[in-house]
Amino acid sequence: SHAMERLSALALENDSGDVAVRLIAVGLRPYQAVIADLAPDHHWPLNNSYDDVINGNNMTVSPVNGGGAFITDVISEDTTHCWLAGNSRRESPNSNLMNGATTTNRFMGGWINLRTVQAGFACLYEEGGGINNLAFFTGQGNVLIAQMADTGDDNVQAFSDFKLSANRPYHVGFRFSYTELTKEFRLYIDGKLQSVTSGNPLTATDLDAHSGDVSWGGPGGSLEVAGTDVLFNLNEDCLFSNWVTWSTSLDESDIQELFERGAIPDVIISSDTGANMQASLDAIANTLRPDAPIAIRIEAPSDGSDLSLDADNVTFDERVTLHVEWQGVGQLNWTNLNGSNFDSAKGAATAGGTFNVINPALLSLTGLVDGTEVRVYEAGTQNEIGGVESSVGGNFAVSVQVNAVDIVIHSLTELNQRLSAVDTSSGDITLPIQQRIDRQYLNP
């Protein structure tokens, strides 16, 4: 991985002279270095400057409505500012690496944040104009569309699989290939290939030169879309950061890396001892993590070891792209407790580590009389797993990490019950409890 951390060896020696060597991380490289290592043709960080830091193709041409402004909101890593377009437009000069000559392979994209739901079709980026063009635009309640239009040849649109949330950063990019990969024009959002296109596969041998406007924030004029000239609105209120273009079709691992290393997490569990990092996770127990590119970033523990964390009812909005980013080089043992739902398929180990997600069985009791005491023990022992002194609402649930449990149910008004060796090895289990009135008053 281009974004792999620099690693050093830590030698540990015990009192007997035994030595163990462990790799430890000594820092992830800045996002700007991650981008530079992929050798782009142009890069506009938009970090309080309109400069292209690669080839000097600066975004200073033909500003419209003042050309927008820099603000201190941050929507991608390694920046202090981003550009607010907001009913304005900026252009850069034509480039033979982009639109001034025929091209056969391409990836372009960056970070955006739509701060509202667009009222109509709004153009975020355009190069070319009229018939020959490449563009990003939004419509239909913040559906993102990327397109390629080529005179007499290919005319393709790629659609987001979902409507983009307002006030939420996304990494977006289009990719096409005539010679390197499958001949398709595709859209990627947060590193993920979007499924719906119209016009693929590509049939020509290249994309014709499409010199003209290279603009952010809105088109210089009408654009052909699927054979029809469309006059777009300026986008209403959009933030831009770290826009980059390549005259090659980046592979999907590189596209994923641009997202993972550029995304700003909602919560950071900072490097510390395992106990202190557990305390930091405990601080967000019983919460729904909101929609974000990355919900939780977990840095490497201070001793470079594996890390074990118990998550107590930490759940994730269904639109979160990555539940957890793990920056350690060892194994993260994450236990989902009491409804936590981290899915390792929505995890990224950006320093080469691994995930071990443990999903204990959820034991649920229903039908309890209010005031009932419940105790759950590891089967055949006095090792209490969980319980409640006085139940309310008829239900009780506890996460179980053993294969069998004993359940003891006490009540002042109902007969006591004991359920022995209840099998919890096959996953979640729900037991309906029917309590009988203690007519003989056997209970103290």
Image (cartoon, rainbow, N blue to C red):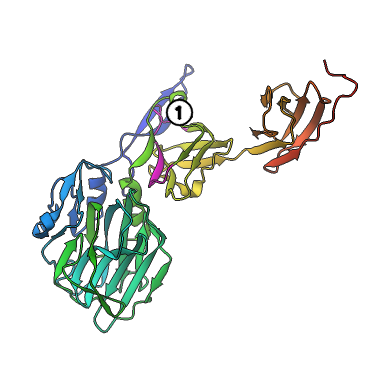
Which residue, as the protein is rendered here, is positioned at the far right?
440
- Write down the residue under mark 1: 283
User: Is any atom of residue 59 visible in this view?
Assistant: no
Q: Which residues are magenta?
A: 290-306
Observer able to see residue 75:
yes
- Name the residue furthest bottom: 152
Residue 103 on the magenta span: no
Q: Nearer the viewer, residue 339 or 381?
A: 339
What amino acid is found at the position of numbered circle 1 in the picture?
Ala
For the point 13% across and 55% down, which residue is it? 67
- Quarter of the image where one finds residue 411: top right
Q: Main secondary structure of the magenta part?
A: loop
Q: Position of residue 278 (x, y in %)?
A: 47, 28
The picture quadrant where one finds residue 428 is top right
**Quarter of the picture holding the C terminus:** top right
14 sits left or right of 88 in the view: right
Task: From the top left corner, tell me how far across and down residue 319 is, in percent.
Answer: 44, 50
Which residue occupies 27% across, 41% down? Answer: 29
Q: Which of 323/318 is in front?
A: 318
Residue 72 spot, x, y in % from top left: 21, 41
Q: In the image, what residue occupies the spot 16% across and 65% down?
A: 214
